[in-house]
Amino acid sequence: FKVLMTPSRLEDLLSQIMEQKVEIIMVLPTETVRKSEEGSVMIMDMVVKLADGSYVDLEIQRITVEFPFERAVCYASDMVVRQYEQLKMEQKRAAREWKAWKKRRDEAESLKQRGFSVGEEEPEPVVKFNYESLRPVYVIVLMNSSADKYSAFREQYIHRTPDEVVFDTGLRERAIQKFIFVSLDIFRDMFNNRDRSKKMTELEAWLCFLASSKPDDITQLVQEHPQFAEMYL
């Protein structure tokens, strides 16, 4: 999967799953720098940062995993903390640069008073950290074999959490952690019973590529979406 997923292909796949146009600016290391007391490290399959500052962890599960949501929450929480630490580190770096610039400016003023011409651009002002700076983190889980709880939704193969957290009082807050679960096995069942006269959507094409190895499906997919031929080769 990682060999096939060039940045442009990954952008296309994520855009279809997330139902929005995404732009990847970097692929991040999959191991965090923080370790537990036992020395274990949380390893994610593929983590990318988007142009809007959001983070996406794309997880591939070939076998049935118990407690998939709880596991995804651990990944999402790890990414929130990682982002928090990055923002705090950037703030400290900016503060150091500002302090160093102020020192040089004071020295320059002293030189100007003695007739020397000294100029230096003012750095970006230090912006104090606030939690509103945190961008959403997405955990997208592609499940080849879904847990039993997903079998109750035989007509739904994608489950997305909303963009807001709604309290019992009606209070609304933006969701920082967002989850998308894709049941490839349920998609396969629905795809096998589809009307073959209808062209696959872009999302269906991607999921067919990931979920099916039937020659008829591959043939139709390549005919309708030729860009997948290179990946099959």
Image (cartoon, rainbow, N blue to C red):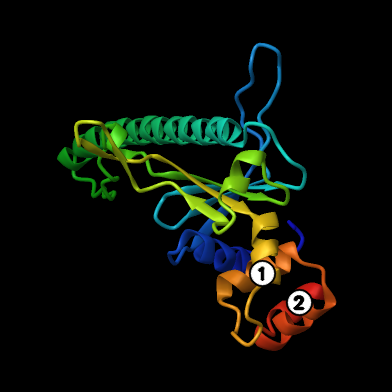
What residue is pinned by disc 1?
191
Along the line of sight, the residue nearer the viewer: 35 or 64: 64
Along the line of sight, the residue nearer the viewer: 220 or 151: 151
Secondary element type, mark 2:
helix
Image coords of residue 63 (percent x, y): 77, 43
Residue type marked 2: Asp
Residue depth check, mark 1 versus mark 2: number of the one nearer the observer? 1
Instruction: Specify whether residue 58 is in view.
Output: no
Q: What is the C-alpha distance between the residues marked 1 and 2?
A: 9 Å
Residue type marked 1: Phe
Image coords of residue 120 (percent x, y): 29, 49
Tell me which label, 1 or 2, sits earlier in the chain. Answer: 1
What residue is pinned by disc 2?
217
Secondary element type, mark 1:
helix
How packed mark 2 is, by other alpha carbons closer than 10 Å (few <14, some 14-19, many 20 or more), is some
Image coords of residue 33 (percent x, y): 61, 28
Q: Are marks 1 and 2 in contact (CB under 8 Å)?
A: yes
